[in-house]
């Protein structure tokens, strides 16, 4: 079995992880300080979000030099030191590849915008005038006027992130060259930012096209063939139909992709992420069922609730008040029991929660830009703030909470963004000091994945499909069975007989309540989650 089918990835957003030099900004030195903490959790791969040179318009997803480390984050020597420390512990490092666009301060764009005849001009997408009314993900038109050459350039994200023109073979050659440069340094792969968008057709407002796959196969030939490389594509537009096309080994594209369908259910369809709608848990279960079936023996899945763009899952789908620990653990078990490679986002392993700041304390360009757009669309400030509290990306970007010390032990300077006020209650030091911590629950889930092949190999069948209070499924493989049940509510729920019958003569391997209940009828306490296992009969 390929190593990554039992691996767990931990995502570090360095700016908010740990500051080692007192400037209030997390950095590579801070990650180095915490390598043993990550090793103690038991994760196998660290995904480091961008640390390349950048003006930080989009916190590093606007790269101005792919071959240099942003001094804000530290030095190339520190990056190499981190790589060596991870390798010494049998861990791997994947970096963030952001090649759908560059920063407007990249030398290619500076040359392109200055002179139409520059050889870099066609590295980007130019039109005499806006040829569509398409809106960018960060509000406003995708077409930005450039006075020096009296034309418009295309940008799907902020106007300081001009899209690269992937039709240009010179662009592709440059990208393959930088990929190989980093692989030659010994990094173990990449998370690829919005990689499905490299096949876009601006004139038709198409976000993807079959060309995306052609480019990825060309990239594989030029960079990954013959190497042991772990790649995960961020494919916001992937579906259960297209996801296998990215990850089936014979396609020679990527190891896996991130699908986002399960995180797009609490919004009014077509109105974007800010227009909130209550989650329908049965809808959530169906989405996971479809993705588990679509990729079974047909490519590979990723499993995640959180990342640096998503709100904190315990606030989003659990209870970040009375049942914070129980619900954080339930959400973790329901996710980690499925087939795929799990991703843990920094702070998820200690149940960090969303924040509610005054508007002026938010930093994210996506949030700041949406306020004007929504005001112009007639939204009240109250509706705008509710959207920001629920879905703003800064929910995931407040400093990692290490201790109850000032600024949660993140920095001894002034943090670039406010710390969540609950850091004195919710922090690593506290979690490591208690028995039933969320941290130790994640350690157990990671070890269970390594111990029970059924989790990586088994099929998937949803149980209690119609009961929206419960998320439950059974995995089967080689005569073995593994059952997971999660009470998605803060109420007591009698476990459906369909499930309690099935789990009768099995063994409980993990629960999120201390005392387990063995009476005839299983009554699930608030957010209770239980994992049962049954070896195949021959082993009895
Ligand atoms: O953030 C989102 C919704 O709130 C997503 O649409 C997100 O913008 C999209 O998935 C692309 O995300 C990636 O590319 C962006 C960058 O801002 C994100 O941080 C990165 O994860 C542009 O590089
Ligand atoms: Ca720093």
Image (cartoon, grey):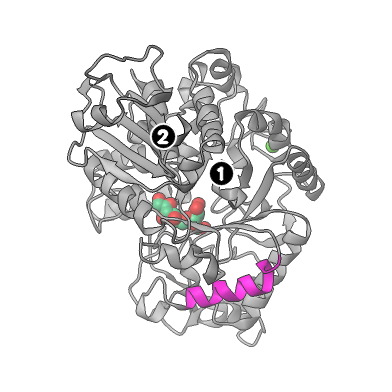
Q: Is residue 222 magenta?
A: yes
Which is more toward the observer, 422 or 219? 219
Q: Spot the residue most to the left.
A: 466
Instruction: Check disc 2 and report its element: helix, strand or loop.
Output: helix
Q: Earlier in the sequence, mark 1 or mark 2?
A: 1
How packed mark 2 is, by other alpha carbons closer than 10 Å (few <14, some 14-19, many 20 or more), is few
Distance from the alpha carbon under mark 1 to that under mark 2 = 24 Å
The residue that mark 1 highlights is: 6
Q: Is residue 13 magenta?
A: no
Question: x and y percent of residue 515 in the render?
Answer: 38, 11
How packed mark 1 is, by other alpha carbons closer than 10 Å (few <14, some 14-19, many 20 or more), is many
Q: Residue at x 37, y 74 (%)?
A: 206
Q: Quarter containing ligand 2?
A: top right
In this rendering, the answer to whether 215 lies above or below 350 is: below
In this rendering, the answer to whether 329 lies above or below 372 is: above
Question: x and y percent of residue 469 in the render?
Answer: 22, 32
Which is more toward the observer, 316 or 380? 316
Question: x and y percent of residue 123 in the render?
Answer: 60, 78
105 vs 297, left or right, is right
Range of residues picked out in magenta? 211-226
Q: Residue at x 51, y 41 (%)?
A: 453
Instruction: Identify the main secondary structure in magenta.
Output: helix
Asked if residue 418 shows in the view, the reply is no
Which is more toward the observer, 223 or 130? 223
Instruction: Check disc 1 and report its element: helix, strand or loop.
Output: loop
The residue that mark 2 highlights is: 537
């Amino acid at each position: 079995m390929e190593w990554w089918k039992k691996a767990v990835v931990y995502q570090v957003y360095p700016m908010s992880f740990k500051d080692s030099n007192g400037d209030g900004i997390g950095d590579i030195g801070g990650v180095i300080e915490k390598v043993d903490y990550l090793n103690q959790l038991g994760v196998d791969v660290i995904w480091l979000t961008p640390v390349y040179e950048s003006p930080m318009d989009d916190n590093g997803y606007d790269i101005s030099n792919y071959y240099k480390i942003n001094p804000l984050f530290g030095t190339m020597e520190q990056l190499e030191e981190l790589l060596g420390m991870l390798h010494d512990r049998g861990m791997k490092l994947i970096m963030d590849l952001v090649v759908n666009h560059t920063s407007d301060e990249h030398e290619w764009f500076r040359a392109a915008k200055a002179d139409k005849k520059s050889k870099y001009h066609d590295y980007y997408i130019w039109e005499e005038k806006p040829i569509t009314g398409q809106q960018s993900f960060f509000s406003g038109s995708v077409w930005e006027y450039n006075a020096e050459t009296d034309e418009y350039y295309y940008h799907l994200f902020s106007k300081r992130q001009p899209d690269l023109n992937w039709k240009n073979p010179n662009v592709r050659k440059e990208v393959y060259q930088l990929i190989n440069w980093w692989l030659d340094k010994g990094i173990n792969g990449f998370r690829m930012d919005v990689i499905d968008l490299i096949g876009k057709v601006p004139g038709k407002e198409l976000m993807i096209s079959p060309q995306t796959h052609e480019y990825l196969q060309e990239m594989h030939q030029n960079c990954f063939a013959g190497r042991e490389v772990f790649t995960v594509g961020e494919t916001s537009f992937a579906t259960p139909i297209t996801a296998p096309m990215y990850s089936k080994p014979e396609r020679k594209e990527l190891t896996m992709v991130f699908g986002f369908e399960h995180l797009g259910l609490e919004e009014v369809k077509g109105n974007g992420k800010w227009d909130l709608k209550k989650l329908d848990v049965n809808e959530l279960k169906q989405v996971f069922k479809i993705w588990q079936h679509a990729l079974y023996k047909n490519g590979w899945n990723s499993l995640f609730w959180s990342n640096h763009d998503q709100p904190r899952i315990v606030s989003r789908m659990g209870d970040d008040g009375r049942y914070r620990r129980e619900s954080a653990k339930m959400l973790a078990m329901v996710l980690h029991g499925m087939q795929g490679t799990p991703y843990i986002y920094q702070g998820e392993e200690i149940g960090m929660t969303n924040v509610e700041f005054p508007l002026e304390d938010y930093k994210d360009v996506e949030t700041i830009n949406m306020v004007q757009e929504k005001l112009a669309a007639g939204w009240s400030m109250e509706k705008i703030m509710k959207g920001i509290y629920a879905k703003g990306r800064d929910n995931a970007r407040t400093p990692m909470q290490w201790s109850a010390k000032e600024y949660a032990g993140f920095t001894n300077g002034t943090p670039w963004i406010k710390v969540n006020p609950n850091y004195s209650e919710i922090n690593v030091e506290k979690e490591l000091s208690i028995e039933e911590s969320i941290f130790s629950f994640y350690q157990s889930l990671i070890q269970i994945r390594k111990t029970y092949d059924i989790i990586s190999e088994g099929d998937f069948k949803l149980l209690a499909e119609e009961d929206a209070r419960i998320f439950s499924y059974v995995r089967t493989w080689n005569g073995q069975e593994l059952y997971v049940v999660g009470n998605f509510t803060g109420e007591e729920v009698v476990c459906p007989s369909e499930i309690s019958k099935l789990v009768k003569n099995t063994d409980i391997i993990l629960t999120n309540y201390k005392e387990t209940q063995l009476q005839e009828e299983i009554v699930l306490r608030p957010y209770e989650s239980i994992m049962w296992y049954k070896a195949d009969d021959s082993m009895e």
